[in-house]
Amino acid sequence: MQKAIRVGRLSVIFLKTAFETRDALDLFEMTVASGGSGLIPHMHREYDEVVYGMNGTVTWTVGNKEIHVGHGDKLSIPRGTPHYFINQQPATARMILLHTPGGLAPEYFRQLATCVDPEGTPSIDCVAAVMMRFGVTPLMHSPSQTSLAR
């Protein structure tokens, strides 16, 4: 198990990496403090994502649909589907995320961490650059999407 990686109001702990699973999957726990988010709307070109709610509630926007993921809920996000998440609740939320096949790597989150200032505000240009390096497509088509991440 890896050490926790803090990205603003998020904390990520990898349980299994693509390296350990021969690229089959990445499995990680994500803790999202109140106000924490996916930084900017995005989509994954090369892998599917499944989210399992453990405690608290996180609001996901998948395509144009808003979905609340809480304890015991499961959300499947096929590759190529635009999505974004934010914890709008006062309590911290915790989720397990599964990416198949694997390949995102802890390094992705370490690099994202350098894009967030001490107050938790992300540099949108930095976040977008990191996403693109790791095969994640940032989606910043409208000012309203970008303002959600701040």
Image: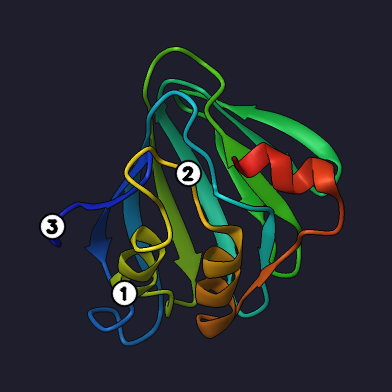
Residue 114, given in percent of the width and then of the height, sits at 35, 63
Q: Is residue 104 left or right of residue 47?
A: left
Q: Quadrant of residue 10?
A: top left
Which residue is drawn at the image coordinates 13% and 61% (left, top)? 1
Secondary structure category for the residue under label 2: loop
Q: Is residue 74 left or right of residue 60?
A: left
**Residue farthest to the top, as pictured:** 90
Residue 41, given in percent of the width and then of the height, sits at 69, 53
Q: Earlier in the sequence, mark 3 or mark 1?
A: 3
Q: Quadrant of residue 137?
A: bottom right
- Residue that carries the numbered disc 2 in the rendered image: 121
Secondary structure category for the residue under label 3: loop
Q: Amino acid at mark 2?
A: Thr
Circles 1 and 2: CB atoms closer than 8 Å:
no
Which residue is drawn at the image coordinates 72% and 48% (left, top)? 146
Nearer the observer: mark 3 or 2; the answer is: 2
Circles 3 and 2: CB atoms closer than 8 Å:
no
Q: Earlier in the sequence, mark 1 or mark 2?
A: 1
- Labelled disc at residue 107: 1
- Residue that carries the numbered disc 3 in the rendered image: 3
Which residue is drawn at the image coordinates 43% and 61% (left, top)? 115
Q: Earlier in the sequence, mark 3 or mark 2?
A: 3
**Image color mode:** rainbow
Which residue is drawn at the image coordinates 68% and 65% (left, top)? 43
Q: Amino acid at mark 1?
A: Glu
Label 3 packing within 10 angstroms: few (<14), some (14-19), many (20+): few
